[in-house]
Image (cartoon, rainbow, N blue to C red):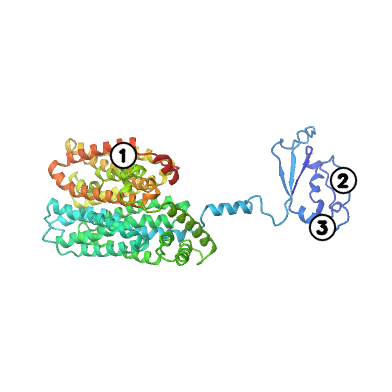
């Protein structure tokens, strides 16, 4: 409705205002004119015309009038000022029919566009599909933290509770890195069967392997059974670390997907901290290493039950249908019901159906453009090779700069650094775990604002300094144990703002659509393979070279990784996956 503008003169003082009788304005049609009589120079208005049908209609519309003082003119002058029509403010009258949308809410079509751009969801329904897969990462981190204390308890003549406590460096390396070799095997197993099982069944299988491996390890009667239990637990790690990020990414609303994937790293750190805490509590108990390892079984039960209740990934169901692995109508109906459950909506609602239709169209288009899935060797060609050099290089340097050794042998390092009592070393490891948790939270909050490269460059630079400090401590600063503790804290903090979360974020971003699945699988293999190799080799190398030279070696490798980041790793902040593929990889 057209706006009515009234130019008003300056206002007199309130005591001199003319106050007309209310009887002069019986009709609400002219109720706004009462405001005009506040000014003494205006004559009284004429009596209102008789009420008619037209007047009644106007009255109903004028009752919703709103007045806005235009800021283009100065405020009303005082009564002592001269009246000037040029300096008077303009009173903007905008009438609005009852039943129209208010000025504080967008028009219906705008609201509809916003709804189309973002998925509707409620937080309780989103958190469970994130929480239970993330427990797979927590159990991986728990194994790291628990092994730190268990490696001390297992070798103690007084605390191990066994007659085979005198382990050689190779035997200890097998115990410590057994789960990592299992994770490497699990990654290889997941490569051909992951799409057949689906993300949900893959995580349920992982939870069963976690339970089995944890119990076998906890009740192991000898070293051979202990190593077998570690291998089984490790296979569960490989399946969980492959299936969890896929399930979270495919079931999360698009507007919070990045946050949830980044938080998975936080759950790994929470697991490490939990392992340190359990190790600290059981370090002085006879056979405490059994409790440390078997404590993972109840958590794995919760993970398995949670994944059993959750629906399959809707995107996986649609992809199987597009591949011709089942009837399209049936799989589409299952996908609609799964998405509705994940978003906390009624089964078969229209919003879920529309979203599934949109996803199905995009999947059909992508599958039609790619006549066949990318082969194994295609990862080593063209843009995929460039992506593999970036992603694979990051996860490789993530491990060979000493990360597994510092984490798995944190308590042992602290013991040799001056904290002779096993309980003291375990408690300091808890402090390191808390610091690791805080730094991971900072990285998650800042990765999208600061960017990937600044965090990588600053963090890897800190890793270089910390490793050279550890080498210097063992060479010339042996009388200052706080140097070792400070170097460990610097290493952990620098790692958690750089290699920790950002390596896997870059891996998930950098590969082209055609080879993304196989590329990520190869990155997982590189990660666990190098992790297991470095962890296994640390103890023999420590005996051969000594701790000073081994950390000096890690420092030199870290310096190479810093040069790699400076010259090879691009910035992907603010770019879509398609833009990364077209602007960086081409």
Of residues 143 and 89, the one nearer the viewer is 143
The residue beneath circle 2 is: 44
In this picture, residue 26 sits left or right of residue 295? right
Residue 291 at x, y percent in the picture: 23, 62
Q: Dot 3 surroundings within 10 Å: few (below 14), some, or many (20 or more)?
A: some
Alpha-carbon span between mark 2 and mark 3: 23 Å
Alpha-carbon span between mark 2 and mark 1: 82 Å
SS category of the residue bearing label 2: loop
* Residue drawn at 26 percent across, 43 percent down: 488
* Residue drawn at 15 percent across, 44 percent down: 541
SS category of the residue bearing label 3: helix
The mark found on residue 56 in the picture is: 3
Q: Outermost residue toward the front? A: 371
Residue 475 at x, y percent in the picture: 17, 36
Q: Mark 2 or mark 3, which has the lower sequence index? A: 2
Residue 138 visible in the snapshot: no
Of residues 14 and 181, the one nearer the viewer is 181
The residue beneath circle 1 is: 460
In this picture, residue 467 sits left or right of residue 161? right
Quadrant hosting residue 74? top right
Residue 260 visible in the snapshot: yes
Q: Dot 1 surroundings within 10 Å: few (below 14), some, or many (20 or more)?
A: many
Viewer-nearest of labels 2 and 3?
A: 3
Task: Give the vertical position of 165 relative to 541 (above or below).
Answer: below
Of residues 49 and 177, the one nearer the viewer is 177
Residue 195 at x, y percent in the picture: 35, 59
The mark found on residue 33 in the picture is: none
Q: Dot 2 surroundings within 10 Å: few (below 14), some, or many (20 or more)?
A: some
Alpha-carbon span between mark 1 and mark 3: 76 Å
């Amino acid at each position: 409705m057209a706006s009515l503008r009234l130019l008003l003169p300056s206002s007199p003082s309130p005591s001199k205002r003319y106050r007309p009788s209310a009887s002069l304005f019986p009709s609400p049609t002219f109720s706004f004119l009462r405001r005009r009589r506040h000014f003494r120079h205006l004559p009284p208005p004429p009596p209102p015309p008789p009420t008619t049908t037209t007047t009644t209609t106007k009255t109903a519309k004028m009752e919703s009038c709103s007045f806005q003082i235009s800021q283009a003119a100065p405020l009303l002058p005082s009564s002592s000022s001269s009246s000037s029509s040029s300096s008077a403010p303009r009173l903007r009258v905008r009438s609005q029919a009852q039943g129209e949308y208010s000025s504080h809410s967008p028009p219906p079509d705008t609201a509809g566009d916003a709804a189309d751009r973002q998925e509707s969801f409620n937080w309780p329904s989103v958190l469970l599909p994130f929480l239970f897969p993330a427990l797979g990462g927590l159990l991986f981190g728990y194994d790291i933290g628990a092994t730190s204390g268990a490696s001390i308890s297992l070798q103690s003549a007084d605390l191990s509770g066994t007659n085979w406590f005198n382990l050689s460096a190779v035997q200890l390396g097998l115990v410590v890195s057994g789960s990592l070799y299992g994770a490497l095997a699990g990654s290889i197993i997941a490569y051909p069967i992951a799409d057949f099982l689906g993300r949900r069944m893959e995580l349920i299988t992982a939870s069963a392997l976690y339970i089995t491996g944890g119990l076998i390890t906890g009740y192991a009667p000898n070293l051979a059974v202990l190593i077998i239990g570690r291998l089984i637990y490790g296979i569960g790690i490989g399946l969980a670390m492959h299936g969890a990020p896929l399930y979270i990414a495919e079931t999360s609303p698009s507007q919070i997907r990045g946050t949830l994937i980044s938080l998975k790293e936080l759950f790994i750190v929470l697991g490490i901290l939990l392992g340190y805490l359990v190790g600290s509590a059981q370090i002085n108990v006879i056979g405490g290493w059994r409790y440390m390892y078997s404590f993972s079984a109840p958590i794995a039960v919760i993970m398995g039950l949670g994944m059993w209740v959750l629906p399959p990934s809707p995107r996986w169901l649609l992809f199987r249908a597009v591949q011709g692995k089942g009837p399209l109508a049936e799989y589409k109906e299952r996908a609609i019901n799964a998405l509705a459950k994940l978003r906390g909506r009624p089964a078969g609602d229209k919003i879920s159906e529309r979203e599934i239709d949109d996803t199905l169209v995009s999947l059909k288009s992508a599958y039609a453009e790619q006549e066949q899935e990318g082969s194994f060797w295609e990862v080593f060609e063209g843009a995929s090779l460039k992506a593999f050099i970036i992603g694979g290089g990051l996860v490789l340097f993530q491990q060979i700069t000493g990360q597994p050794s510092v984490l798995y042998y944190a308590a042992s390092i602290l013991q040799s650094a001056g904290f002779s009592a096993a309980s003291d070393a375990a408690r300091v490891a808890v402090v390191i775990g808390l610091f690791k948790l805080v730094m991971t939270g900072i990285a998650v909050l800042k990765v999208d604002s600061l960017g990937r490269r600044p965090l990588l460059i600053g963090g890897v630079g800190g890793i270089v300094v910390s490793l050279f400090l550890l080498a210097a401590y063992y060479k010339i600063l042996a009388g200052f144990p706080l140097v070792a503790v400070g170097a460990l804290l610097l290493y952990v903090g620098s790692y958690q703002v750089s290699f920790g979360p950002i390596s896997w974020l870059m891996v998930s971003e950098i590969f082209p659509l055609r080879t993304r699945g196989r590329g990520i699988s190869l990155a997982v293999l590189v990660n666990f393979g190098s992790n297991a190799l470095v962890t296994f080799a640390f103890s023999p190398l420590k005996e051969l070279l000594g701790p000073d030279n081994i950390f000096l070696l890690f420092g030199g490798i870290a310096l190479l990784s810093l040069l790699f980041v400076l010259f090879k790793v691009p910035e992907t902040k603010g770019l879509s996956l398609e833009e990364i593929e077209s602007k960086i990889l081409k």
